[in-house]
């Protein structure tokens, strides 16, 4: 059925929405919600709705490499059912290992058909990092390495979206010692715009928002210096955190079982990475706006930041020294250095009085001589 | 005075030399003050004290103030640093940038002498300098790099919070480090250089004052150091790099 439609004239998003039995009201609700998520003014709701009504579906190829599928899981749980039903499940995805019905040759064929038929038009979404060590044997699909698949699919893609921290930064499999040389997408894809949507996983609404932006405006959203959409990653979790007043007041949870934790004080001292993490968790929250880590009493672990596994500890603000076998943090190291310096100086001071005795004696004698010769 | 010379002891006559100009002295103490404030507030920001209070959170702003002071001091530190770089080109010969950067064989040779005589305290001819000795000059050169690292990482972290264009110019720094987490750590580690430097610096000032008796400690107050008449006459003192006299 859907293949037939595709061969005739690709349906618009609105047509598909209607086919699925959604009302006009549901559709507009979805359009307003998306407009709000991507930070548009209210008069742009019409623009979003119109784009959805008139533009044919954008074909999407969604590749899965070294990942845990939490990005897909997050996406299909984004709060409005139209996201799951229309953007993802029924229309857009021509190829995705997790959700497509086809398998084996049929699946590979579907991908190749899309790549041929929509040359330069399809969006390539990548979930997961690409291992480059040992010629990429650590992640192979259909006899090809993930790097081959990526290069092939990226060649004629309109834009590339790197979903999640794996595709954006490498995430846990790229943590030291990175045995498979897990590499993020932007280091492998050249000459194509890569939109990074980091997070482990990213927020479902953020993912939907990025796709809706691409559909509505036909160009990639404004990105920051790290290649993340500004609409969602320009503020720190800390700046939008509802516990921020406790931070400014200097009231902190000292340990997870103390009185301050019950009072809902700031989690800064138990390792919250909110002050260093750029994401929309404090605003959009998770699971239909139910909660987010800090709201449930656990600090942010900085999952959308590069190398958050290696850059310090999850439950401690102390800055550990990467590469030191022992659990040395910068301050312990500094205190030891200070102690050694103090000891060296004390030694030096003693030695000064021994080795430079003559010099010091002369100065003292000169001074005493003058003192004696002064009449008053 | 003439009588003194005839005594068994040779009492040196000292010549007053204006070494540290007023702007250099202002720079020094402003810098010292800013660094102390930055270290204290920086430690607090990194690991705040467990303060108890019955007050409502809304009425308290402890961390807010500590951070505000840190940022005020950071701006003073930054502009003071820029000023010192400028003064390295227009100030007197002892403030000149050439006293800090090892560019000549003479500079390295003098560093080696200072190392032998003042640090290892080997026997040899005492080393007399008026401005910075070569070793000190080079260490200050390193501190300028540390200043640069702190300014880059500090304003880099501040960039996303600031509204002024100046801190925003540093937004590329966290991007280079791959995010704020690493930038913050570099900022924190580099602070220890300042602590170690300050301790050694103060010790060596006392050391030089003690073994030379030429007004090392007070020079950063009035700007004067003293040099023995014979050393002055015979030009026995050392300078890391000769700065050509301006016409």
Image (cartoon, rainbow, N blue to C red):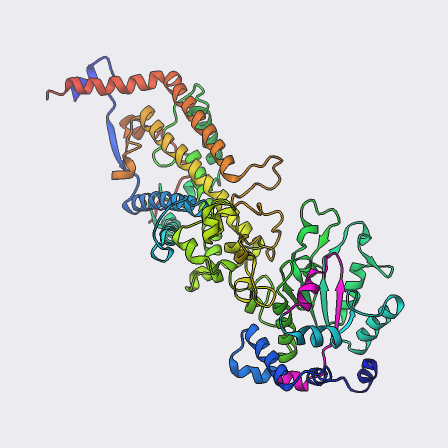
Q: Is residue B128 above or below residue B153?
A: above
Can residue A368 be found in the magenta stretch? no
Residue furthest top in the image: B8
Residue at image location 76% in from the left, 59% down from the top: A65
Relative horizontal placement of residue A5, taking residue A242 as reference (left or right):
right
Residue at image location 72% in from the left, 59% down from the top: A128
Q: Is residue B65 above or below residue A337?
A: below
Q: In which quarter of the image is residue A29?
A: bottom right
Magenta residues span A49-78
- How far from the left and from the top, in percent, is residue A97? 79, 65
Q: In which quarter of the image is the N terminus of chain A?
A: bottom right
Q: Is residue B159 above or below residue B101?
A: below
Residue furthest right in the image: A105
- How far from the left and from the top, in percent, is residue A75? 67, 67
Q: Is residue B68 above or below residue A332?
A: below
- How far from the left and from the top, in percent, is residue B145? 47, 45
Q: In which quarter of the image is residue A14?
A: bottom right
Q: In which quarter of the image is the C terminus of chain A?
A: top left
Q: Which of A289 and B85 is in front in this view?
A: A289
- How far from the left and from the top, in percent, is residue A245? 42, 57
Q: Nearer the viewer, residue A57 or A29?
A: A29
Residue furthest left in the image: A376
């Amino acid at each position: 059925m859907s293949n037939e439609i595709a061969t005739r004239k690709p349906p618009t998003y609105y047509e598909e929405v209607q086919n699925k039995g959604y009302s006009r009201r549901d559709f507009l609700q979805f359009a307003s919600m998306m407009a709000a998520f991507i930070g548009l003014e209210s008069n742009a709701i019409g623009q979003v709705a119109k784009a959805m009504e008139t533009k044919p579906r954008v074909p999407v190829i969604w590749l899965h490499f070294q990942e845990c599928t939490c990005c897909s899981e997050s996406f299909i749980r984004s709060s409005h059912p139209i996201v799951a039903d229309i953007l993802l499940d029924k229309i857009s995805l021509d190829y995705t290992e997790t959700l497509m019905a086809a398998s084996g040759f049929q699946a590979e064929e579907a991908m190749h058909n899309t790549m041929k038929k929509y040359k330069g038009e399809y969006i390539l979404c990548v979930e997961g990092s690409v291992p480059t060590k040992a010629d990429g044997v650590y992640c192979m699909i259909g006899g090809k390495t993930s790097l081959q698949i990526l290069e092939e699919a990226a060649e004629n893609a309109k834009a590339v979206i790197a979903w999640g921290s794996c595709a954006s930064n490498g995430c846990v499999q790229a943590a030291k010692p990175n045995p498979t040389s897990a590499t993020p997408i932007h280091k492998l894809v050249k000459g194509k715009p890569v939109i990074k949507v980091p997070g482990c996983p990213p927020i479902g609404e953020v993912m939907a928002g990025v796709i809706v932006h691409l559909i509505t405006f036909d160009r990639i959203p404004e990105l920051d210096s790290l290649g993340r959409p500004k609409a969602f990653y320009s503020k720190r979790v800390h700046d939008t955190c509802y516990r921020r007043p406790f931070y400014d007041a200097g009231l902190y949870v000292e340990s997870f079982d103390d009185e301050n934790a019950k009072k809902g004080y700031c989690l800064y001292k138990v390792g919250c990475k909110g002050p260093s993490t750029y994401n929309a968790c404090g605003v959009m929250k998770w699971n239909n706006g139910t909660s987010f880590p800090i709201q449930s009493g656990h600090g942010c672990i900085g999952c959308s930041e590069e190398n958050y596994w290696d850059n310090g500890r999850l439950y401690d603000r102390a800055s550990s020294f990467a590469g030191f076998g022992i659990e040395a943090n910068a301050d312990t190291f500094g205190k030891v250095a200070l102690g050694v310096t103090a000891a060296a100086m004390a030694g030096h001071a003693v030695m000064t009085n021994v080795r430079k005795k003559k010099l010091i004696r002369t100065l003292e004698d000169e001074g005493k001589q003058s003192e004696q010769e002064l009449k008053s | 005075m003439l009588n003194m010379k005839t005594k068994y002891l040779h009492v040196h006559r000292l010549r007053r030399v204006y070494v540290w100009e007023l702007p250099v002295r202002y720079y020094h103490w402003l810098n010292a003050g800013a660094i102390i404030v930055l270290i204290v507030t920086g430690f607090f920001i990194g690991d705040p004290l467990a303060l108890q209070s019955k007050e409502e959170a809304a009425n308290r702003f402890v961390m807010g103030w500590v951070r505000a002071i840190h940022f005020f001091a950071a701006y003073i530190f930054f502009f003071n640093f820029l000023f010192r770089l400028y003064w390295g080109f227009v100030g007197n010969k002892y403030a000149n940038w050439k006293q800090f950067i090892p560019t000549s064989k003479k500079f390295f040779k003098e560093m080696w002498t200072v190392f032998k005589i003042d640090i290892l305290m080997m026997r040899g001819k005492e080393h007399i300098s008026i401005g910075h000795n070569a070793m000190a000059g080079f260490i200050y050169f390193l501190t300028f790099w540390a200043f640069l690292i702190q300014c880059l990482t500090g304003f880099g972290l501040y960039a996303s919070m600031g509204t002024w264009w100046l801190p925003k110019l540093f937004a590329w720094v966290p991007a280079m480090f791959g995010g704020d987490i690493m930038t913050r750590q570099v900022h924190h580690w580099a602070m220890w250089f300042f602590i170690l430097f300050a301790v050694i610096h103060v010790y060596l000032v006392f050391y030089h004052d003690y073994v030379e008796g030429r007004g090392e400690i007070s020079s950063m107050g009035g700007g004067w150091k003293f040099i023995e008449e014979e050393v002055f006459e015979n030009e026995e003192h050392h300078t890391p790099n000769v700065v050509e006299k301006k016409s």
